[in-house]
Amino acid sequence: MMLDLRERPFTDRGSRLLVMAADDGSLWIAAARYETPLRETTVLTGLRVLAGDRELPVRRALPDRVEFAGGVALAFAGPDTLVLTGDGGDGGEGGDGVRAVWDGGRASVGDALVLVGPGGDGTHVAAPGGPPPDGRAVLEAAAARWRDWFARMPAVPSDLRERAEQAWWTLAVNLVPIQGRESLIPSKYGYVGLWNWDSYFHAIALRHADPGLAREQIRILLDHQRPDGLIPDVVHDHGVLAETTDLPRSDLARLAQHVGGPPVREAVPVTKPPLTAWAVWKIHQADPDPGFLAEVYEPLVRAQEWWFTRSDPDGDGLAEYLHPYSSGLDDSPIWDGGPRAEPPDLNSYLALQYDRLGDIAEALGRDPGEWRARAQALVDRMVARRWTGARFATLVGGREADVRTPLDLLPLLTGRLPADIADRLVADLRSPSFWGERPVPTVAFDDPRFDPDAMWRGPVWLNVNYLLIEGLRRSGHPGTARELRERTLAMVRDGGGLYEYWNPLTGRRAGRATSGFGWSAALFLDLAHEAFTDSAGSAGSAGREG
């Protein structure tokens, strides 16, 4: 695959460095850091390669190297070390009179020039000098690393392979150490931490090729679980985000501007939607490990109980989000009415979690009956108290919100709804409110608040589609699930990149969506692999029938 050095920078697994193209044709390098824009972490600017007075342009950028004309190449010799070498292997000018220049520095390339290395103060500086590394060995090692990674990519249909390779590359480069442990972050563009919800979706893709790494993402979160059972929202370089006192100042300002109702002045716990047991079970299905299930079972139980003991302020047996960030839907118009809400997704996740705890208990030789009973009781409570006859209500500050979002449809995920209610939700999904060439908008097409480019106010998000696809299957609608999967895969295939979210009208990157987004890459891969498996199974069945 090719890198464009803009949406797809030159970077590497384990590295915080990103090499990108500047508007003037030079390259610049920045370091990815938690809650810090890249413009504030610039390492080096104005990088060019010259032979005499002639500039050697970038010919192409690949996952393992950036190739310049004249046989010069740039590659990673380690997470913090970039090497510019004249031994690019194309028989060009090599190091003969070739030099690198950058703002404030210059040096001869020679056989290999260590361009960027760790500085003593923890920053990164241009650091020529010292014994040069073997340029050819650096290039060969980088190529071998990437060959091994791509060899483990899950199989996908041929028409999806190009985007799948980009997705698999995205997952690799988003792996960085956080507090000394390899963590898959959402994006090096601003999301440099292990986010709770994201990690579950990341693990779904990792389980196909590296289930041990998938389990490690869950372990990191559970190792930071609070004594009361809460799993933090983020594990980052400097600690965790587990309550509003941990929020960066920029987030507090944004929330004050966006969220309706009076400002919340006391400390509020911050987490993400409860899908931990769901992700654990998916990993186990791909790579059974009873020891891991035994390790995480009690923490999962405590996490589940937290929602009913600490996040059900009115005590009605239906949990609420106490903060917008805990929903993962930061800018949804749900929050225009205030900072506390109970959309239908939350208790749907919790009912699903009860069933997954039952699966885990059964795999460990325990009685799953209590968990199954709790799952059904919670669904019955949702139907009795929140089903209006047409939709599941979203409550904000104790009042029913009139905004229409696909969260209204997520009770399908429980697989326990009465058939007539499930059918009504599927009819709503397939109506013009939510169905189109590129479903599903995060606010209904015909809702006056629909905005195709604003974060959670209309764009398509892959995690919402993924959960709806699973819910459709669990609720007995496999045909609609398959159609939604195919439309989702086509949108991503044709949309230009792996974005945080997509404009449902154009199928392109929406608004200020981040590129190189981890869960979009992970869920696209999982759905594409599922499509490949289904296709292979159908072909096999046809062959046997013949």
Image (cartoon, helix red, strand yellow):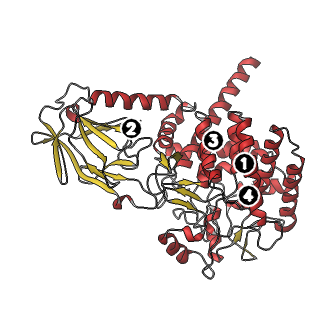
Q: Around disc 3, counting alpha carbons within 10 Å, would you say few (fewer than 14), some (14 to 19), or many (20 or more)?
A: many
- Separation of marks 4 and 1 at Cα, in angstroms: 21 Å
Helix, strand or loop status at disc 2: loop
Q: Around disc 2, counting alpha carbons within 10 Å, would you say few (fewer than 14), some (14 to 19), or many (20 or more)?
A: some
Occupied quadrant, residue 76: top left
**Of the pair 213 and 460, the residue shown nearer to us:** 213
Is residue 200 visible in the rendered image? The answer is yes
Q: Position of residue 535 (x, y in %)?
A: 65, 30
The three-letter amino acid code for the residue at tag 2 is Met
- Position of 208 with respect to 494 (left or right) is right
Q: Position of residue 432 (x, y in %)?
A: 67, 59
- Residue under label 3, please give it: 215
Occupied quadrant, residue 458: bottom right
Helix, strand or loop status at disc 3: helix
Q: Are marks 3 and 1 in contact (CB under 8 Å)?
A: no
Give residue 277's mark: 1
- Residue under label 2, please give it: 2
